[in-house]
Image (cartoon, helix red, strand yellow):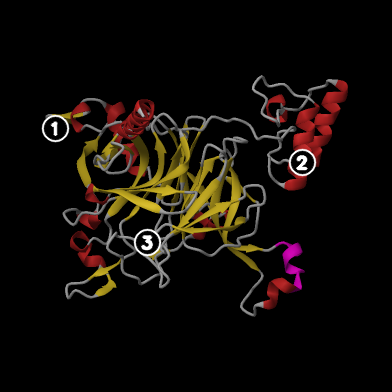
Amino acid sequence: MTNKFLLLAVSALSCFTLVAQGLTFHGVYQTSRDNDYPNGYYSEYVGWNYQLGKTIFIVQQGLYKMEWDGANGVTMPEKDPAVNKADFYSNGQFTDNAKALWASNFNMMYANSGAVIKDGVLTTIMSRTDMQNPDGQWVTNDTNRFAVRHWDALTGDLLSETEIYPAWDCLESAGMAVNPNDGKVYGLFHITNKYLPDSILNDPDFFADEAADSTDSGYAICTIDLTTMRISQITPGLYYDNFVTFAINSEGRAFALTSGGGTAAMPAADGKIYDIDGNLSGAHVYEFDLTTGLIMADNRMSTGYCSQMKRQAACFSKNDPTKMYWMGYYNSGMGYDDYGNWNPLNDKNWKTNGKYDTSLYEVDITTGEANRIANIDDRYLFAYMWVEGEEEPEITGLRGDVNMDGNVNVTDVTLLINYLLYNDATGISLANANCDLDTEGNVNVTDATVLINYLVNSNW
């Protein structure tokens, strides 16, 4: 009995210690709304810098961090690195032009179409749908749709001039992330008005729906080359859900969240949304197969919370690939109005009715159920988020991907057998060839057997 008691005590202490550690989240600022400022956004005019030849403002764009204590406490997001006017401006004059320019550059850290960190560089994509022409009219300019910028992920230094890309490059995404299995950047990109390939156009079943047309329009899993900003579609734009996040865990599994904002249901006493049968409803969690680009069968799960149809952020901690952290809206834009009725909330009253309030959630990807950790003060929201010290995943390699092309197929078996016969490791990854996960890294006939079994049975 004593031993059992000690074991339980140690186990409980271990759980307490794990929870008490908490996590520090970093992110790219997306939005915060405040009626006290023009357009609802904070902006401070500092002055005209004659040496730089530009007006200096301090705005809310930039890099932020917030801390979660592992229980219910979440600190208010704050800039990290901080922007202090006193560091570059004093007594009506600029004292440090380099810092003034650095602070001013944060004005351009918009990521309303996605962001990702790779090789220490933060890439942000801003969608510019409405711009003023020389006559002062607001117009849609498809040839100058996306503004791309590259930053030092830790210091916030701007590393490049703004790059402009047209609408047909389809750079808007629900999110991007690096896959630790192959080191590639994947994203859930919104494909618009691209022509479908002949393989689909010639399939009579595809056009059984009279409403179908010949263009590719919807979300698709793609890889992206951050040097050229060219996406490569793994599938056509097959999916039409209102996706708001995309994240990849340390195992290389990819998940996306929908907003769930289409439901008019009221939350239950526990704050969660249920359907008529008492099952969790609200925002859905989907897992994608990064090889095929398709949603994995029977893998639609409900979080129990509804959000809004706007870009949000999600990430995993490498220490627990089963928990996805989601920084999202507190509600779907529905709530109790001034008369106590459940109705769409008024945009004009967002400061008091909670329409744009935000929260930090923890989503269990084994069940899909989410738990609201805490509300976030002042309606802050990130467009991209990561755990401190985990800006980039450790690239572990893809088990069975002997030729390192990002896929596991019969070619890998052939190369592995050739290696075993002739001991020639040219062009292959022995780490990936260790299919039986031998702790000493040995590669032998057992690995070939395990790999063949995987290809036949689709599981390790």
Q: Quadrant of the N terminus?
A: top left
User: Can you tell which mark lies on residue 426?
Assistant: none
Marks 1 and 2, Cα distance to the nearest angstrom? 73 Å
- Label 3 sits on a secondary structure element that is loop
Confirm whether the magenta stretch covers residue 181.
no
Whether residue 344 sits left or right of residue 237 in the image: it is left
Label 3 sits on residue: 306
Count residues near mark 2 (Cα–Cα under 10 Å), then give few for <14, some for 14-19, many for 20+: few
Q: Residue furthest left?
A: 91
Q: Amino acid at mark 1?
A: Gly
From the image, give the main secondary structure of the stretch colored magenta.
helix
What percent of the width, then of the height, locates residue 393? 51, 33
Q: Amino acid at mark 2?
A: Asn
Asked if residue 120 is positioned above or below residue 178 in the image, the reply reads above
Q: Nearer the viewer, mark 1 or mark 2?
A: 2
Residue drawn at the location 74% of the way across and 47% of the way down: 457
Magenta region: which residues?
197-204
- Specify which label sits upstream in the sequence, 3 or 2: 3
Count residues near mark 1 (Cα–Cα under 10 Å), then give few for <14, some for 14-19, many for 20+: few
- Label 1 sits on a secondary structure element that is loop
Are the residues tagged 3 and 2 within 8 Å (C-beta)? no
Residue drawn at the location 41% of the way across and 51% of the way down: 112
Asked if residue 259 is positioned above or below residue 177 in the image, the reply reads below
Q: Is residue 438 visible?
A: yes
What percent of the width, then of the height, locates residue 215? 63, 67
User: Can you tell which mark lies on residue 453?
Assistant: 2
Asked if residue 242 is positioned above or below residue 382 in the image, the reply reads below
The residue closer to the viewer here, 149 or 341, is 341
Q: Amino acid at mark 3?
A: Cys
Residue drawn at the location 54% of the way across and 52% of the way down: 188
- Specify which label sits upstream in the sequence, 3 or 1: 1
What percent of the width, then of the height, locates residue 223? 60, 46
